[in-house]
Image (tube, rainbow, N blue to C red):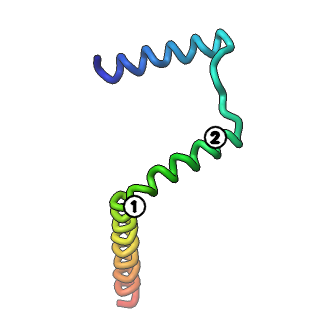
Amino acid sequence: MDEATQRQIASKGGQAAHQKGTAHEFDSEEARRAGQKGGEAVSRDREHMAEIGRKGGESRQSANRGARQGAKEEKR
């Protein structure tokens, strides 16, 4: 089954649950706890976290290079 068909079926199920009144809706506290659990699970993967850190460092470094390059060109 392709992804679009699967999403369409899942959407119909969610709509039916809401109409029936049995769908679960997160309150803000529940959503906060769920997000926290997800963050904890992701941060257990040290290799993944190291990769994220490297990407952030590379991005920041290239942004700083661009800013310095622009400042040099303005002085000319």
Residue 37 left/right relative to 18? left
Residue type, label 1: Met
Residue 10 numbered mark, or none: none
Splitting the image into 4 quarters, where does residue 21 fall?
Answer: top right
Residue 31 numbered mark, or none: 2
- Relative to 7, does residue 48 appear above or below in the rendering? below
The image position of residue 16, as x and y in percent, is 58, 11
The image position of residue 9, as x and y in percent, is 43, 14
Q: CA distance from mark 1 to mark 2?
A: 23 Å
Q: Secondary structure at mark 1?
A: helix
Residue type, label 2: Ala
The image position of residue 51, as x and y in percent, is 33, 62
Instruction: Specify which label sits upstream in the sequence, 1 or 2.
Output: 2
The image position of residue 11, as x and y in percent, is 49, 18
Residue 21 left/right relative to 12? right
Which residue is painted at 39% across and 66% down in the image?
A: 53
Q: Which image quadrant: the N terminus?
A: top left
- Relative to 62, does residue 5 appear above or below in the rendering? above
Splitting the image into 4 quarters, where does residue 2 fall?
Answer: top left
- Relative to 59, does residue 48 appear above or below in the rendering? above
Q: Which image quadrant: the C terminus?
A: bottom left
Which residue is painted at 46% across and 18% down in the image?
A: 10
- Relative to 25, does residue 60 appear above or below in the rendering? below
Label 2, residues with CA under 10 Å away: few <14, some 14-19, many ≥20? few
Q: Quickly name the residue at label 1.
A: 49
Splitting the image into 4 quarters, where does residue 59 fall?
Answer: bottom left
Label 1, residues with CA under 10 Å away: few <14, some 14-19, many ≥20? few
Label count reads 2
In this rendered view, identify the residue nearer to me: 17 or 37: 37
Marks 1 and 2 close (CB-CB < 8 Å) = no
Which residue is painted at 36% across and 87% down in the image?
A: 72
